[in-house]
Image (tube, rainbow, N blue to C red):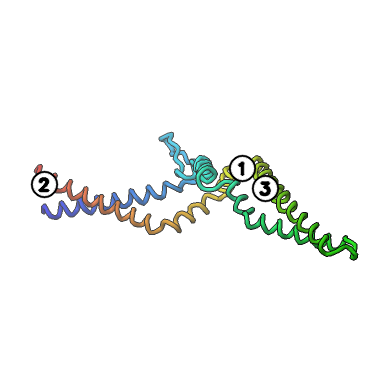
Amino acid sequence: MQFVTIMFMVIIGAVIGWITNILAIKLLFRPLRPYKIPLLNYEIQGLLPKRKAEIASNIGKTVDEELLSIEDILNKMIEDEDKSNIVKAIKIRVNMIIDDKMPPIMPSTFKNMIKEYVDTVVEEEIASLINDLSEDLIHKATARINIKEMVEDRINAFEMEKIEDIILSIAKKELKHIERLGGILGGLIGLIQGIIVIMIR
């Protein structure tokens, strides 16, 4: 009889723990919209739908401040190698223009001197100009583009059902473990309660 009592309380505890965790997981997402419980005058809504705007704002802020900035993006787009290739292309183009515009009778030695001088000027001035333009572009882009707002708007535009599907597909195994853990802990609590009840009798 005592064994039956303990097993009964273990089963009841396990079922309660399992169902409680299932409900807790469901209440992360549902109800999608505020629902007022009749007679109790109490309103419930899923945690994620209720705090979606706040979550989106925090994610946007984290991405902007900790993970990604517009400066990082533009610096990656305009690397030193790209600047060097631009200077090289301009030098080639300028040399072609010099060859085309210089009179054919001009001595090649003099022509090469001009090319070398122009190459030096292009190397120094254009490289400096590209750096200035890059910094100006980054400054303007930083003022105009708001990574935080972009991420925040994107998340807020997501349908809650879509967010739920994404989270469940990623964390399906872990959520199942949480459900089972609820059953195990509930069963252990039931076992302890059963033993206490028998000892009190």
The amino acid sitting under disc 3 is Asn
> Which circle, 3 or 2, is nearer the viewer?
3
Q: Give above or below for 123 relative to 33.
A: below
Q: Position of residue 38 (x, y in %)?
A: 44, 38
Amino acid type at image mark 1: Asn
Q: Is residue 44 left or right of residue 143?
A: left
CA–CA distance between discs 1 and 3? 23 Å
Q: Say which amino acid is labelled 2.
A: Ile
Label 1 sits on a secondary structure element that is loop
| Left/right of residue 1 with respect to residue 120 in the rendered view | left
Q: Nearer the viewer, mark 2 or mark 1?
A: 1
Residues marked 2 and 1 touching at CB (< 8 Å):
no
Earlier in the chain: of badge 2 and badge 1, it is 1
Q: Does residue 12 appear to the left or right of 126 in the view shown?
A: left
- For marks 1 and 3, the one nearer the N-term is 3
CA–CA distance in space, label 2 to label 1: 65 Å
Residue that mark 1 sits on: 146
What residue is at 65 percent from the left and 42 percent from the top?
A: 139
- Helix, strand or loop status at disc 2: helix
Q: What SS does tag 3 mark?
A: helix
Q: Look at the image and tell me whether residue 52 can be seen.
A: no
Q: Check the picture and name the quadrant holding the N terminus.
A: bottom left
In the depicted view, which residue is nearer to us: 148 or 152?
148
Instruction: Please identify the quadrant where the C terminus is shown.
Output: top left
Q: Who's the residue at 45% across and 43% down the image? A: 47
The residue that mark 2 highlights is 198
Mark earlier in primary sequence (3, 2) = 3
Q: Disc 3 marks which residue?
A: 131
Number of residue marks: 3
- Residue 145: x %, y % from top left: 64, 44
